[in-house]
Image (cartoon, rainbow, N blue to C red):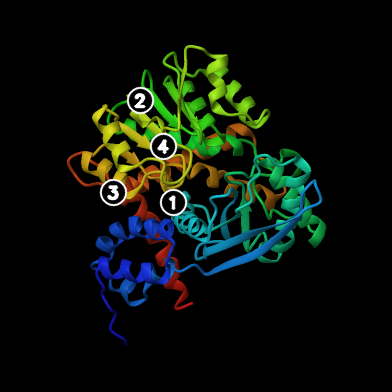
Amino acid sequence: MAVSDHVDLPTFMEGVKKRNPYQPEFVQAVQEVAEDIFDFMADKEQYHAQQILRRIAEPDRVVSFRVCWEDDAGNIRVQRGWRVQNNNAIGPYKGGIRFHPSVTESVLKFLAFEQTFKNALTGLPMGGGKGGSNFNPKGKSVREIMRFCQSFMTELYRHIGADVDVPAGDIGVGGREIGYMFGQYKRITNQFTGVLTGKGLEWGGSLIRTEATGYGAVYFLANMLATKGEDLVGKTAVISGSGNVATHAAEKIVQLGGKVLTLSDSGGYIHDPDGIDQAKIDWVKDLKNVRRGRIEEYVAAFPKASFVKGKTPWGVPCDVALPCATQNELLGEDAKMLVANGCKAVAEGANMPTDLDGVHTFKAAKILYAPGKASNAGGVAVSGLEMSQNSERRSWKEEELQQMLKDIMLGIHQSCLEYGDQGGGYTDYVKGANIAGFKKVADAMLAFGVV
């Protein structure tokens, strides 16, 4: 039997960087997981001998393709599309599709890598994947978006399937885009299967899918606070973003007795000292989903609020913070401000919104800090439940789904406690989530042999 090579963390990461040049987001995601996994693997020869972490950090495949479409003026436009299928050790690949100009292979590889562990934490049989395009839906007509989605699916359809890879929505991809892509898949294959999640309720979708990511993040936040004998009643919350995740996180904070102070978009953030209540949240949902407006318009409707251009909201004093916009939006200096201002807990609604300096700052301060792979897993959890409903050709009631979501988030929290307990009343949720997710995927990979 060959003797395994026990490399140290710096050597391992040097290899990752060499194999993935010019892919900083992916390298960052691997580094964040590897920092915890190396300690866990120290006395576990089987993981070293089978090169498990090395294999998880190499996607099963990266599919890249050209997407040609015609704009309303008759011009031929060309974008690039990808599907990253990272690991299917515990189930079909599962993860969203993102349409945004910032999409690159590096971003999608990091998201698929994170998704592998996130999906494992839910307890549902789902592997990790992610896809998307550098197409920007902003400023495009409905017909242009439809033509692009159809062209994108014309290539993607051959790589996905209900038991192979089940995409969902993500940034720039909502119910409208899912509808266009599902319609094209059905048109090409003549099959009506659960190949996409986030579908409309009339054609196979699930109740509470829209709310699930934001609600789940707040449920996880409440579970963390409960370990300290606290709840959200009377707590002030700073939230970034103003899309689906942010608005539903705000909604659940309000329902549980908290006060939301901020929302944001790429142009800046609004600060409402009176609190963003349910009526104001509904106004923002209409602004973003129907009128497709910018968050700065909030101030005209609610003059007591202020708009800060080009900034993130992390300098606003708060009890809890929920970054719900995009990756690397909360930097080391932002984390220091939050801690200095007395923030007690951070729950990530977005994927990897905190950079490594910020992660290390929160850990050093020993505040309650939940990484996205744990706290924002509610969305993919309900996507998994949508897959189950599609397989059974049935729909579950909202009350059933809400309870399942709460139970799944509680289960993830308990897994984090199991592997992240550092003694003295401190839980390292990042370590707990990384180890719990890794162990499930790694043990399945060991069972399959070298494949």
Left or right position of 357 against 304: left
Q: Is residue 397 above or below residue 172?
A: above
Amino acid beneath label 2: Val
User: Residue at the spot x=53%, y=29% of the render?
Assistant: 247
**N-terminal-most mark, 3 or 2:** 2
Number of marks in the image?
4
Which amino acid lies under the numbered mark 1 shown in the image of this protein? Answer: Leu
**In the rendered structure, which disc, 4 or 2, sits on the residue that comes first in sequence?**
4
Name the one closer to the observer, 393 or 237: 237
User: Label 4: which residue?
Assistant: 220
The alpha-carbon separation of the residues under discs 3 and 1 comes to 14 Å
Q: Nearer the viewer, residue 364 or 440?
A: 364
Q: CA distance from mark 3 to mark 4?
A: 15 Å
How far is disc 1 from disc 2 in space, using C-alphas? 32 Å
Specify the label residue 420 is tagged with. 3
Residue 316's tag is 2
Tell me the amino acid under the disc marked 3: Gly
Question: Residue 364: where, in percent of width, then height?
Answer: 21, 43
Residue at (64% x, 35% y) in the render: 397
Residue annotated with mark 1: 121
Left-right relation of 10 to 447: left
SS under mark 4 = helix
Does label 1 or label 2 sit earlier along the sequence? 1
Mark nearest the camera among 3 and 2 is 2
Q: Is residue 253 visible?
A: yes
